[in-house]
Image (tube, helix red, strand yellow):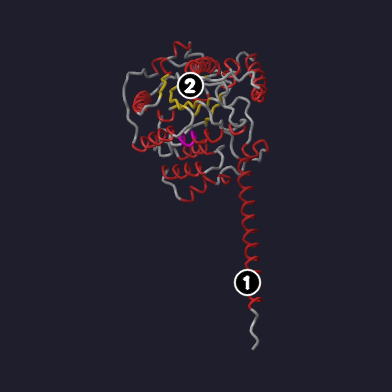
Amino acid sequence: MTKAKPEGNAAERKRRVKKRLAVLLTCLLQAALLLFCVVHLTYMRRAYTRLSGFYTLPKNTADVVFVGDSVTFSSFMPMEAFQNEGIAAANYCTNMMFENALRYSLADVQRTQHPKVILVDIAPFLSEHWAGNESWSEQDRDLYISYNLDSRNYTPDRLSLVYEITRDRKGSPADALYYFFDLSRCHDNSPDLARWNNQEKDITRGYGYLVRNGMRQFSPEELCPDDGSITPLKDQEQRYLDQLLETAKTMEAEVVFYTAPVYYRESSQVGRKNYVKNYIEQKGFLFVDFSGDKEAIGLDLAEDFWSPDHFDSLGALKVTKHFSEYLKTHFTLPDRREDPAYADWAADLHAWQTQLQDWTQKDGGAAGCP
């Protein structure tokens, strides 16, 4: 029997290795292409949230970022701050922000913008906004979860948030996959090319809705005064607050915690606000309680709110002026209005002025509520 030559065996092994590597590379490329398609099709089919648009900001142009929920985006008009004070600011807000989502939002802001100041609205902690809230119906819980996940870029932080949400709601691994690969949740939506790569432009820089109070009048008897009461957080919420503060320590920006100049309808909200304020200050962070500034701002309960803790656009104009003055007084922020690098902001400002003027000419906008 003739033995195969060693050179022939080596050549055959080399050929087989090359073939296997080619197959592996092909599989990897196919998997990458499939993942790319799934991710971008998801972006185009996702539901709209107020976070849409943040990722379209020119990189590292926002000097100030407000992080929070609907309370936050109803109170601050970034383009008004840019017009009147030259402050380049943006809102990083979802319609409802979970307590544990705040720290991931901080990381996302630093990763994409590197602002000088980040203001964190503690509103989520005042109403027990986390996936483990047992007072919510399952339908409401799923809606609130979508607010926290939709519009966020696919990142390791988003994966961690999905894990925590799944754990808090006592879900299964299948639930985690359902929330992370959220195409299954929004497959009925028509693809919108404007959202390609999660890049849906928002000229308002994250402001909420141009709206007037048309719900009803609120009486002082419905509201809870700040009596100095203290209401501690639940154990899991306390852990989320501690984790938020640990993340804040790692930020390059100065992190300021605050509460907006709103009213409260439940005594627990007042107690939680005071507890969180005291705790944050004890940990060495700056906390600004704007809730006592309503008179100084000139807010009118009947005209400037569409709910006791949400502002209509007339109220937002007043609060924006107040916040802008605070920022200019306490931080060294450049005036970006004549900066050539902010030509995109100037163009959006013109579009915003047109939009606001059109709304104002309609008798301040049609009375109503989003």
Q: Residue at x 54, y 42 (%)?
A: 155
User: Considering depth in this image, is 307 or 352 the residue closer to the camera?
Assistant: 352
User: Considering depth in this image, is 90 or 181 the residue closer to the camera?
Assistant: 90
In this rendering, position of residue 282 left or right of residue 361: left
User: Considering depth in this image, is 135 or 130 the residue closer to the camera?
Assistant: 130
Q: Indicate the quadrant where residue 98 lies.
A: top left
Residue 266 spot, x, y in % from top left? 38, 24
Q: Earlier in the sequence, mark 2 or mark 1?
A: 1
In this rendering, position of residue 195 left or right of residue 144: right
Overall secondary structure of the magenta stretch?
A: helix
Residue 215 spot, x, y in % from top left? 51, 20
Q: Residue at x 38, y 16 (%)?
A: 221
Residue 245 spot, x, y in % from top left? 40, 33
Q: Residues within 10 Å of mark 2 (few under 14, many from 20)?
A: many
Front: mark 2 or 1: 1
Which element carries disc 1, helix, strand or loop? helix
Q: Is residue 36 above or below residue 61?
A: below
Q: Residue at x 63, y 65 (%)?
A: 20
Quadrant holding the N terminus? bottom right
Give the labeled residue for mark 1. 13
Which amino acid, by three-letter code, is at mark 1? Arg
Q: Is residue 150 above or below residue 315?
A: below
Give the labeled residue for mark 2. 307
Quadrant holding the C terminus? top right
Q: CA distance from mark 2 to mark 1?
A: 74 Å
State the extent of the magenta-drawn residues as a range.
101-106
Count of numbered tags: 2
Which amino acid, by three-letter code, is at mark 2? Ser
Q: Quick check: is 105 in the magenta stretch?
A: yes
Residue 262 spot, x, y in % from top left? 44, 19
Q: Quick check: is 99 in the magenta stretch?
A: no
User: Considering depth in this image, is 34 or 229 the residue closer to the camera?
Assistant: 34
